[in-house]
């Protein structure tokens, strides 16, 4: 969706944001958005790591049960 905006659309959005929020608030808003994106990335990485660990534990358990069945 964002890839369809293009340079002119991005410039228009930035000009509108500058008009609406003013030059003093814009850096604060940018910092807040950056922090939010960072937190979201950390949370999604944490969830991804948890899922990978669960899958690896399940694979180890399945391999262990497979070895036990061969005996």
Image: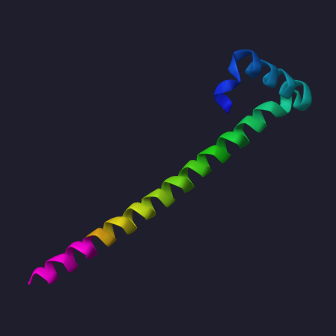
Residue nearest the observer in this picture, 7 or 39? 7
Q: Which residues are magenta?
A: 60-71
User: In percent of the image, x 85 and y 30: which residue is there?
Assistant: 24
Q: Position of residue 27 (x, y in %)?
A: 76, 32
Is 55 situated left or right of 64 in this image? Answer: right
Image quarter (top left, top right, bottom left or bottom right) of the N terminus: top right
Residue nearest the observer in this picture, 51 or 17? 51
Q: Position of residue 32 (x, y in %)?
A: 72, 43
Image quarter (top left, top right, bottom left or bottom right) of the C terminus: bottom left
| Colouring rule applied to residues | rainbow
Image quadrant in which you'd find residue 19:
top right
Q: Position of residue 54 (x, y in %)?
A: 39, 68
Image quadrant in which you'd find residue 52:
bottom left
Magenta includes 62?
Answer: yes
Is 31 situated left or right of 52 in this image? Answer: right
Is 59 situated left or right of 43 in this image? Answer: left
User: In percent of the image, x 56 and y 48: which residue is there?
Assistant: 41
- Does the magenta stretch mainly form a helix, a strand or a loop? helix
């Amino acid at each position: 969706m964002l890839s369809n905006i293009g340079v002119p659309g991005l410039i228009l959005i930035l000009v509108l944001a500058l008009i609406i929020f003013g030059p003093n608030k814009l850096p604060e808003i940018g910092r807040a958005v950056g922090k939010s994106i960072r937190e979201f990335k950390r949370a999604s990485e944490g969830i991804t790591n948890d899922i990978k660990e669960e899958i690896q534990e399940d694979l180890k358990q399945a391999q262990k049960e497979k070895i036990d069945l061969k005996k």
